[in-house]
Image (tube, helix red, strand yellow):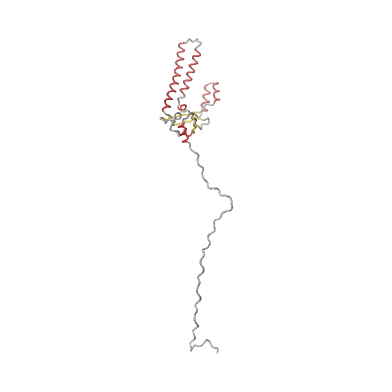
């Protein structure tokens, strides 16, 4: 399967703890540079020479640098095997050309096809040796816009750890419900004044006795004269 990692996460070192190819725990971490593919239309520039093609390919190529990419012990053995095959083909091509120039006569008609075979061996050796780099060994390349690192033939354990590293969806913030349209709501009226009991009932007015009589020697009021 192909696993996608954000380029910013790869640059920051937020990568799994297992190898991408074999899914085994990492025994070493290496600085790895992932590159994008050269656009197909750029190969037309080979008709004008290798130099124009190399310049345009270098300008258009996107790069993402991983400071600590995980590799396991099997990756180390695969790297060694690819280097040995690539270097062996290059050495065989060079030795073959030297031996051919010493054994064949200059005007031999078979020299041309044999030299072409050795040239193809040389190109094949360089190609195999180039796959021993960290980026090709991890089977990763960068998208055309440089924002994603695609890892091809990724192991299931590697894919699981990548999924665990990815941030989940952020929960939506809960807002209070919007008030419904309707008549305005007023606060309740204050409670009524406290009710007191009936006024106290008083008894009848006290009854007083008759007025005291005047003394005998006292005039009974004012007499007209």
Instruction: Say which quarter of the image contains residue 75.
Output: top left
Q: Position of residue 101 (x, y in %)?
A: 46, 12
Above/below status of 86 relative to 181: above
Quadrant where the image shows the C terminus: bottom right
Estimate the x, y position of residue 15 in percent, counting from the top left.
45, 33
Viewer-proximal residue among 92 and 2: 2
- Residue 35 in percent (x, y) is at 49, 28
**Viewer-closest of 29 and 105:** 29
Residue 32 vertical placement versus 199 (above, below):
above
Which residue sits furthest bottom? 225
| Circle count | 0
Q: Is residue 107 above or below residue 62?
A: above
Measured from the top left, where is residue 170 in percent x and y?
50, 40
Q: Which is more toward the observer, 201 or 54? A: 201
């Amino acid at each position: 399967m192909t696993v996608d990692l954000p380029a910013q996460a790869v640059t920051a070192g937020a990568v799994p703890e297992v190898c991408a190819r074999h899914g085994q725990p990492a025994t070493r971490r290496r600085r790895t540079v992932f590159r994008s593919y050269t656009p197909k239309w750029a190969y037309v520039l080979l008709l004008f020479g290798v130099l124009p093609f190399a310049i345009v390919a270098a300008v258009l190529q996107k790069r993402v640098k991983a400071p600590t990419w995980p590799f396991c012990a099997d990756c180390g053995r695969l790297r060694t095997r690819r280097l040995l095959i690539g270097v062996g083909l290059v050495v065989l091509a060079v030795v073959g050309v030297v031996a051919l120039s010493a054994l064949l006569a200059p005007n031999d008609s078979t020299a041309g096809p044999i030299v072409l075979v050795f040239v193809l061996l040389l190109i094949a050796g360089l190609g195999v040796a180039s796959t021993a780099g960290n980026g090709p060994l991890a089977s990763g390349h960068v998208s055309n816009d440089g924002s994603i690192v695609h890892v091809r033939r990724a192991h299931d354990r590697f894919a699981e750890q990548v999924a665990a590293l990815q941030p989940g969806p952020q929960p939506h913030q809960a807002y209070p419900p919007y008030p419904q349209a309707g008549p305005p709501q007023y606060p309740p009226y204050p409670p009524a004044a406290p009710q007191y009991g009936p006024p106290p009932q008083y008894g009848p007015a006290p009854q007083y006795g008759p007025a005291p009589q005047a003394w005998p020697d006292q005039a009974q009021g004012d007499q007209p004269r």
